[in-house]
Amino acid sequence: MKNFLKLALMAAGVFTFAQSQAKPMAKDTTIGHKMSKTAKKVGHATTSTAKTVGEKTADAAKDVGHKTSELAAKGAAAVTDKKYEGKCGPNGETVYINKESKYFYVNKAGHRVYVKKSQLMDASKMKMEKMEKMKDKD
């Protein structure tokens, strides 16, 4: 108990001494008002640049996440579900059939989009349409 009391008194003494030796900082007014304006301009420019970089990074991260999700979902579907040969989705996507006999394709965000059999297109027709579009662009 004596050692604890000694330690507490010593800590209080050090704290009191440190507070008594601390001096408030005086403002330096020799630099003037111009430095303050320049610092504000740099601060604002830095802030806007940081926001822009942050937004672009977030967009890129979202795109990478969607692509990763899409590839993972397509890989899982290829392993667990049957691929429907001869048919494709509305935009030429690969169509799978799950164990409940439901048709679906995987969109660009990696989500399964279930479609009716009547919504499916012949894969050969879709290839022909894509080829015609390519010719029209040239």
Image (cartoon, rainbow, N blue to C red):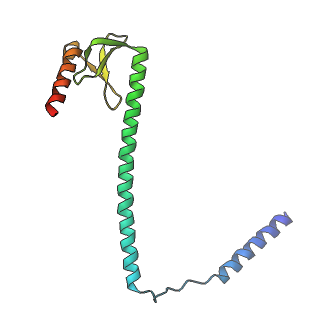
Is 65 on the left or on the right of 131, as rendered?
Answer: right
Quarter in which the C terminus is drawn: top left
Could you say which is closer to the camera, residue 28 or residue 76?
Answer: 76
Residue ID at (32%, 10%)? 101
Residue ID at (19%, 29%)? 134
Residue ID at (17%, 22%)? 129
Residue 118 x/y as whole percent: 19, 13
**Eyeballing the image, is 60 above or below 89?**
below
Which residue, as the protein is rendered here, is positioned at the far bottom? 30
Residue ID at (40%, 31%)? 69
Could you say which is closer to the camera, residue 83 or residue 12?
Answer: 83
In the rendered image, which quarter is residue 91 located in?
A: top left
**Eyeballing the image, is 97 above or below 2?**
above
Residue 22 visible: yes
Residue 44 x/y as whole percent: 36, 68
Could you say which is closer to the camera, residue 16 or residue 42?
Answer: 42
Count every numbered label the image shows and give the total: 0
**Eyeballing the image, is 88 above or below 36?**
above
**Eyeballing the image, is 96 above or below 40?**
above
In the rendered image, which quarter is residue 8 located in?
A: bottom right
Is 73 on the left or on the right of 103, as rendered?
Answer: right
Residue 21 x/y as whole percent: 67, 83
In the rendered image, which quarter is residue 77 located in?
A: top left
Which residue, as the protein is rendered here, is positioned at the far right? 2
Residue 76 x/y as whole percent: 42, 21
Which residue, as the protein is rendered here, is positioned at the far front? 138
Residue 121 visible: no
Is 8 on the left or on the right of 58, as rendered?
Answer: right
Quarter in which the N terminus is drawn: bottom right
